[in-house]
Image (tube, rainbow, N blue to C red):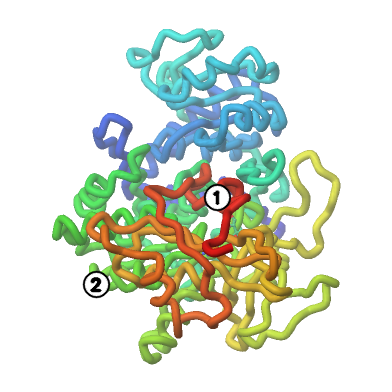
Amino acid sequence: MDAQLSITTIMHHAEMVAGSKEIVSRMNDGTIHRYTYADAFLRARQLANTLEELAIGAEARVGTLAWNDYRHFELHYAIPCSGRICHTINPKLFPEQIKFIINDAEDEALFIDPQFIPLLESMSKELPSVRHWIALCSQSELPISSLPNLQSYENLISRQSSEFDWPEFDEKRASGLCYTSGTTGNPKGVLGNHRSIVLHGMAQNMASSVGLTSEDVVMPLVPMFHVNAWGMPYNAPMAGAKLVLPGPHVADAESMVALVNSERVTFSLAVPTLWSGINSYLNESGASLPSLKRGVIGGAAGALSLYEDMDRHGVTLENGWGMTELSPMGSYNRSLGWHTRMSDSSGGQQRLKSGRPLFGMQMRIVDEDGNSLPHDGKTTGVLEVRAPWACQSYFGGTQQHTWFSTGDVATLDPNGYMQITDRVKDVIKSGGEWISSIEIENAIMSHPGVREAVVIGVSHEHWSERPLLIVVPEDLEPELTAEALLTFLQGKVPKWWIPNACEFVDELPHTATGKVSKKSLREVYDHYQWPGA
Ligand code: ADP
């Protein structure tokens, strides 16, 4: 049948099979909000009626600056299912970038968590397309603001009927817009459509991939403004799983562990820095996570020591690779029986792989001239992908991708496992040969005195570039020396990869999506004097 793949079908499915399942939200003030999918979708209908009343155009962009909670969830349905485009904005970007992307998207309305109101007040006069400003709060919580006619979300939707005739439209109709963080140049808009969201969800929910079931309780620590919390507001209801939305304080490991335990969360998703915070808290407090079985670690490479520590806490971390342009998931390293039967060292290396492509995702690695390279697990090349949920061109752009060049350098092995070894722009080229910064970082992270570590390429008179190791030591390791760390690497990585020097710092700079910013570090160490040089 010519039935269209739409986000509305996810809503109808969840209403039918999981109407009484809960969505639990931890709000900014720490209070818990609890209701069901059935309740959420009734409110989504009230919200769709509100969008009509506000006369927001068909396919208009509607921006959100919000944390993971139930109102943001409602926006993820009411906006696209009524034929508009949900533009999730990362509030941690620089104000100039936020201004740029709101103007580039020409958002007609903005739905704003009250804590971001001052940020928008500072730029509202330079956002000519925005006609409606709506604070995600009740009427009594509405702050006094210079934003023109700022309205309360609860007040607006309470006036509306909870009946709404969801329109039918072509599955290729745009549904969501998310900008890349723009580490080079201006952020670029990635437009998803109903079909890409549904196909991505179906592929992610296959058993050998993320494979959620209706028995799961899913808590995404990754924010909904970072590519739809890696799909969870759509994929959890698609699987009929309970959803726990943790609000703004995801870096507070103690309260996240308490939330996992009180809601019996079985599955979570986070970048390595957040998993690392949870691991440290568990180690220090002696707390445990009896319900949590699995978690996705993604967005950046995680260290093997973190996987192994979390094993001891009963949580199997699984590496997921993706990018905004891929809605976002491309590959997943589902923990399998044969991995656990491998010897310790090869089992460890297997877990660190970025996983097998999701069904529907094609992958190849190519050399500088675009020639395909062998899948031997050793040869590195630039990773190119193709999938029905990969972005065809950037928002407002004309260049059409047939194969999308990811900007990542990777290997592919005979079992179909891909492994990221670097980003093209982070690659260290020493004497004409590539050195994998990620592999060195992994090796050094197994040293107990290292809390965080990063390796960057710094210019070198003789080799053109050499690796520099930058380390945040554990508090209890005042005696740690650069020499000891560099010696520790011997035998763990090829000899010529061992960095020429090691610097200690108190903290590392992070990007708006929580990843270590190698770009900022390269700027800091631009004129670095190699010891003895
Ligand atoms: P940005 O961080 O530039 O805003 P994304 O959030 O889309 O963009 O990040 C995509 C990039 O993050 C990938 O191209 C890759 O370099 C890196 N990345 C994502 N997941 C992983 C992973 N599991 N392991 C290593 N790197 C990853």
User: Which residue type does callout 1 highlight?
Assistant: Leu
Q: Nearer the viewer, residue 517 or 367?
A: 517
On the image, the x and y values in percent for residue 346 come to 44, 87
x 48%, y 25%: residue: 112
Q: Is residue 468 above or below residue 64?
A: below
On the image, the x and y values in percent for residue 95 come to 57, 27
**Horizontal side of residue 116 vs 283, given as left or right:** right
- Distance from mark 1 CB to nearest ligand 1 atom below 8 Å: no
**Horizontal side of residue 97 vs 442, given as left or right:** right
Question: Circle 2 is placed at which residue position?
Answer: 312
The N terminus - image quarter: bottom right
x 52%, y 26%: residue: 111
x 26%, y 58%: residue: 478
Q: Indicate the secondary structure of the residue bearing disc 2.
A: helix
On the image, the x and y values in percent for residue 430 come to 67, 71
Q: Nearer the viewer, residue 93 or 495?
A: 495
User: Which residue type does callout 2 highlight?
Assistant: Arg
Which of the 4 image quadrants contains residue 530?
bottom right
Which of the 4 image quadrants contains residue 188?
top right
Which label's residue is closer to the chain start, 2 or 1? 2
**Horizontal side of residue 309 vs 197, given as left or right:** left
Q: Would you say residue 12 is visible in this rendering?
A: no
Q: Indicate the secondary structure of the residue bearing disc 1.
A: helix
User: Dot 2: few (<14), some (14–19), or many (≥20) neighbours within 10 Å?
Assistant: few
**Horizontal side of residue 417 vs 372, given as left or right:** left
On the image, the x and y values in percent for residue 66 come to 46, 33
x 51%, y 60%: residue: 300
Q: Is residue 433 above or below residue 164?
A: below
Q: Which of the numbered marks, if any, corresponds to residue 521?
A: 1
Q: Is residue 325 above or below residue 36?
A: below
